[in-house]
Image (spheres, rainbow, N blue to C red):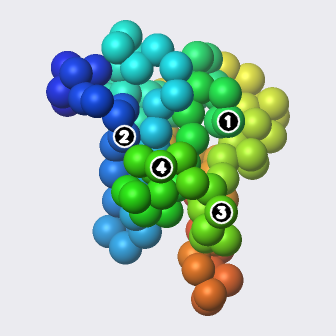
Amino acid sequence: FDLAFQASANGIVRVDVWGYLRVYYRRVVDKETFTPYYYLFNNWNPHRNEYGVDYELYSTYTAALNRDDSDDSTPTCNDAKEAFANEPGSFPGKGFPYGCEFMEGDFGYMYKSTGSQ
């Protein structure tokens, strides 16, 4: 998984949250050395993985490819900073999207991860 990601042209991973919410994680820096499997599935943490600095989130692959965040349903992980501030360090066994909030299009659906998935 990591080698395929590192060799990819765009550094984009689709994450299906509970099977119905698709989020596209796009690595902005260090794509060639970043190990997404560890971060996304085992240990979601801010070390070399800060939203808006190291990675971006999108609601569609096309938006991720074009780095277009104009869609109102674009996911955000700003809330993860609060979770990390309240519980410093990493979250072993808690993968993405621990601490994130997502708005789902016109329905105003909000998903807030509690790390229990």
- Which label is found at residue 70? 3
For the residues labelled 3 and 4, the Cα–Cα distance comes to 11 Å
Q: Quadrant of residue 111?
A: bottom right
Q: Who's the residue at 62% across and 87% down the image?
A: 106
- Which label is found at residue 25? none
Sort mark 4 into few (<14), some (14-19) or many (20+) by Cα contacts within 10 Å.
Answer: few
Q: Who's the residue at 18% across and 27% down the image?
A: 4
* Vertical placement of residue 52 versus 114, above or below: above
Visible in this render: residue 15?
Answer: no
Residue at image mark 2: 12
Q: SS class of the residue under badge 2?
A: strand
Q: Which of marks 2 and 3 is nearer the N terminus?
A: 2
Q: Which of marks 4 and 1 is nearer the N terminus?
A: 1
Question: Does residue 97 appear to the left or right of 2 in the view shown?
Answer: right
Mark 1 vs mark 3: in front: 3
The kind of residue tagged 1 is: Gly
Q: Do the residues labelled 2 and 4 touch (CB within 8 Å)?
A: no
Q: Quadrant of residue 56?
A: top right
Q: Earlier in the sequence, mark 1 or mark 2?
A: 2
Residue at image mark 1: 52
For the residues labelled 4 and 1, the Cα–Cα distance comes to 15 Å
Q: Who's the residue at 40% across and 58% down the image?
A: 62
Q: Are marks 1 and 3 in contact (CB under 8 Å)?
A: no
The kind of residue tagged 4 is: Asn
Q: SS class of the residue under badge 1?
A: loop
Q: Which of marks 2 and 4 is nearer the N terminus?
A: 2
The kind of residue tagged 2 is: Ile
Residue at image mark 4: 66
